[in-house]
Image: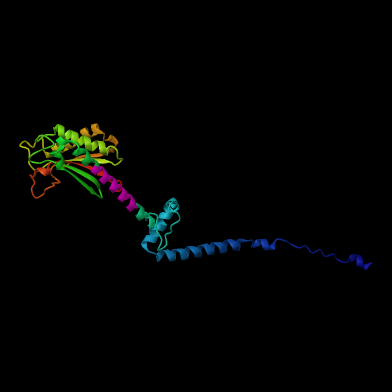
Amino acid sequence: MAHQHEAIIVVKKVKGHAAHHGGAWKVAYADFVTAMMAFFLVMWLVNQSKEVKASLGGYFRDPGVFEATGGRGIMPGGTGPGDPAPATDKAPAIDKAAAAAEQQALEKSASHIREQLDKVPEFKTLRKQIEFTVTAEGLRIDLLESSGSTFFNSGSADMGPEAERIFAVIAHELGTLDNTIVVEGHTDSQQYANAERYTNWELSADRANAARRVMERGGLKSSQLLEVRGQADRQLKVAADPLDPRNRRVSVLVKSHAG
C-alpha cells in the first residue's frame, strides 16, 4: 500500500517568455538605419554645389514645380525647374522659317502700298517722302517732311488732304494684317517761342494722334493699335542737322510677331 503515499509532481509550462523582448529590436534597428541614411544624405549634401542645394530646397518648398518640368533632374548635368528645356534642332529651324515668312509678308505689304500710291497722280510729290524699311523689329513706314512739301501745316497737327489720303491708303493695307501697330510723331529741334504752353512734345504727340485717327477711318483696326508716341526731337533722323526738315516725320511701325 506504500504506493498510495507517493507525491504527484505537476509540471506547468509558462508560455510567452519571448514576448518580454518582442519585436522592439526591429524598431530600434529601423531607427538606426534611418539615422544612418540621414547622416549620409547630409554628408552628401554638404559637398554639393550651391545650385544643387538651391534645387533641393526648392523641391521641398514646392514639389509641384518639379513635376511640371517633366521629370528633369537636379543632379549636375541636369536642368532645374527654372532652366529652359534643352533646345532641339527643329525649333530654331521653325523659328527662322516663320521669321522669314513674316518678313516676306511685310515686304509684300510695303510693295503693295507703293503700287497703290503710284496710281494716284497727285501723290507724286509726297510719295517720294515715304520710306519703307523692313527690319527684325518689323516694317517701318516713315513719312518725312521736306522744305518744299509737308504732310502737316507748319507748327501744327493740321493735316493736308493729300496727306490724309496717303495715310488712308496705308491704313487700308495694314488693316488686312494681324500685326500690332505703333504710331510715332517726331519733330526737329526748332523750339516754340512760348515753350511754356506748347512744345515739341505736344506737337509730336498731336501729329501721331492725328495720323492714328485718319488711319482708323481708313481701315486700320483699333485692336491693332499698340502705342501712340510723341518723341519730340529725341530721335532725330538727321542727327548732324537737328533742323533738317526730314527730322519732322510720322513713323508707322508694323510690329513683327517675333519682335
Magenta highlight on residue 113: no
The single residue placed furthest to the right in the displayed view is 1
Percent across and percent down for residue 84 are 37, 55
Find residue 80 and report its image quarter.
bottom left
Q: Residue at x 50, y 63 (%)?
A: 35
Percent across and percent down for residue 141 are 20, 43
Q: Is residue 17 above or below residue 91?
A: below
Can I make out residue 206 in this image? no
Q: Is residue 250 left or right of residue 40?
A: left
Find residue 207 and report its image quarter.
top left
Q: Residue at x 11, y 44 (%)?
A: 246
Percent across and percent down for residue 233 are 12, 44
Q: Is residue 183 above or below residue 80?
A: above
Find residue 178 and report its image quarter.
top left
Can I make out residue 240 in this image? yes
Q: Which residues are magenta?
A: 95-111
Q: Is residue 135 left or right of residue 51?
A: left
Percent across and percent down for residue 172 are 25, 36
Magenta highlight on residue 98: yes
Q: Residue at x 14, y 42 (%)?
A: 128
